[in-house]
Amino acid sequence: MMMKWRGWALATGVLAISALAQAAPPTPAMLSNACAGCHGTNGGSAGPSMPSLASQSKEAIVEAMKKFKSGERPATVMGRLAKGYSDAEITAMAEFFSKQKLHATTQTLDKAKIAKGASLQESNCGRCHIEDGKEGKDDTPVMASQWLPYLQMQMAEYQSGKRKMPEKMAEKVKPLSGADLEALLHFYASVK
Amino acid sequence: MTLDRRSFLKLAGASAGAAGLPLIGRAAELMPKSGKRVVVVGGGYGGTIAAKYIRMMDKSIEVVLIERNDHFVSCPFSNLYLGGLLPDLNTLTIKYDKLAANHGVKVVQAEVTGIDPAAKSVTTSKGTLTYDRLVLSPGIDFRLDEMKGYDAAAMEVMPHAWKAGPQTILLRKQLEAMKPGGNVVISIPLAPFRCPPGPYERASMVAMYLKQHKPGSKVIILDANPDIVSKKGLFLKGWKKHYDGLIDYRAAKKVTEVDTGKMAVMIEGLEEVQGAVINIIPPQKAGLIAHAAGLVGADKKWCPVNPTTFESTLHKDIHVIGDSSIAGAMPKSGYSANSEAKVCATNIVALMNGKEITEMSAINTCYSFLSAKEAVSVTGVYKVNAEKQAIEAAAGSVGVSPDLSEVEAIYAESWLKNILTEMST
């Protein structure tokens, strides 16, 4: 028992030293992994109302987080969570998610609507939502393979005026019917 | 460090006794260790994620996940089943086959009976395993000595349903079988306990069911705490809106004794309350294995850990995450366990590769349902205050919903889908 006691004292001495060891600032992965409980591992969401962040544009994530933080974009949990991060941390997380592989969602989409959306997208949305929505100009979000229910919820927020549409987008959306918009969302959700 | 010599010796004895073997080393070795190995105990919100993320970050580390069941049932959302919003527990249940196939986690279904921190070995019902580092995520256990008469037999009469599974089904059956007009008693222990808003969400869900199916019935909440512990304003608002007169909330009523014969609970020997259905949420502590392994601190309830690595401050190379750990300002929730597991995994991989450890960054996000279509949330971003060596919330990140919200109920469902998918794929 005496031996054990000495061994224990020695072990705690070692622990006391290791507790003081310096830790490096959080890496992009350390910051981003915490988001994955809601947004899926590496930002690939399995929940239809929760956007995938994998392969999202860095600028779009930074812009979204800034607007969540300031309250400009309507939010529930994101308005509060965004306040927990510095601008540098937000940029690091945005870069992390932008580098992840596009998450292919398995969802039921309407083929006729996809076809209609495909015919509408180039002339109406293609200048900013480039490459069939797989890329975005400046801070335009990537739309490809996003969950349809999430896209529909966002479009509803735009149309109710809760979320402010960028001016260029508002111009393009104005002449489109509700059915046109629905078709466009089906199209973008279908792009792999 | 907080242990005096006497209690250390006692713990050492308890540890050997718990193994039920004369010498742990003599039990048959289950899986001989060749390279670097982490053993993870507990296949819930914390353990699955720790196992998966270690493998995602370093394929050269062998990870063995030990869990006594072949499946796991989520506590989050189990109150919705009690309220009748879910037909069964299937959507709350995960298995481990994909975690094994996708990440090479070796899943062993066995009961852990002892841990020898000096020999770095774990004794299970199927044999022993040695480790380089051990992650314990055993969830909670109950302080039954603080509630007279509440034993295993009493749990079958007055279910706790605070570990989801058969207990949850039993409580639901009791609610269904109850005669209209009967009262449902819910007893809440002193904080801290698993899922701070959980008991109040449960009261909401039970009241919803009673309102629809049991005219004349109500919920009596006996709360040991001086007030509602979490999301107070929102619960009171929801109760007034949906269940006015159906929830009788009584603060500072600590249940200290149960009488299954009389279907009654006693409050500190002063008052007796009867119920047709009685749900005892008992006072809580770290999982029993953490006690047996000598990982519990001076409070005799929870495990003190280094806030950056979640390594026990009492035994080297053993990390404790989730409900069992003392994680500063982080609540004991499923999301906290998920986030802590990733912090722990990151730094275990660093330590095992002789690399610098990384400061922790974690999140908690929890939803509670007030009605079939409305939910509320609580959030927080957590970091270590280097001076105090304690986990604190980042300014502005902690808060609750401004109001009951239908959108949050929709988000909550995706929360469940994502977090369970993360744990099981």
Image (cartoon, rainbow, N blue to C red):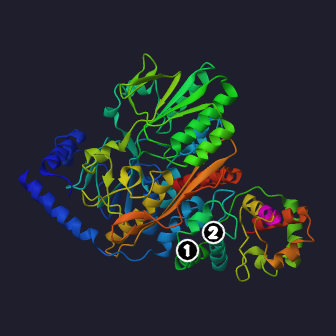
Q: Nearer the viewer, residue A124 or A112?
A: A124
Q: Which residue is painted at 54% across and 78% down in the image?
A: A92
Mainly helix, strand or loop, the magenta region?
Answer: helix
Left or right relative to B412: residue B398: left
Q: Position of residue B111 (x, y in %)?
A: 35, 41
Q: CA distance from mark 2 to mark 1?
A: 10 Å
Mark 1 residue crowding within 10 angstroms, few (<14) / some (14–19) / many (20+)? many
Nearer-N-terminus badge (2/1): 2
- Image quadrant holding the C terminus of chain B, namely bottom right
Residue A166 appears in the figure:
yes
Q: Quadrant of residue A65?
A: bottom right
**Chain identifier of the residue bearing label 1 in the image:** A
Left or right relative to A163: residue B120: left
Q: Which residue is mark 1?
A: A93
Q: Which mark is residue A53?
A: 2
**SS under mark 1:** helix
Q: Position of residue B70 (x, y in %)?
A: 46, 42
Q: Which residue is painted at 65% across and 39% down in the image?
A: B240
Q: Position of residue A137 (x, y in %)?
A: 74, 82
Look at the image and say whether residue B221 sits in the magenta stretch: no
**Number of residue marks:** 2
Q: Which mark is residue B239?
A: none
- Above or below, B368 relative to B309: above
Residue B59 appears in the figure:
no
Q: Which residue is painted at 82% across and 76% down in the image?
A: A169
**Chain identifier of the residue bearing label 2 in the image:** A
Residue range in magenta is A155-160
Left or right relative to B135: residue B8: left
Amino acid under label 2? Leu
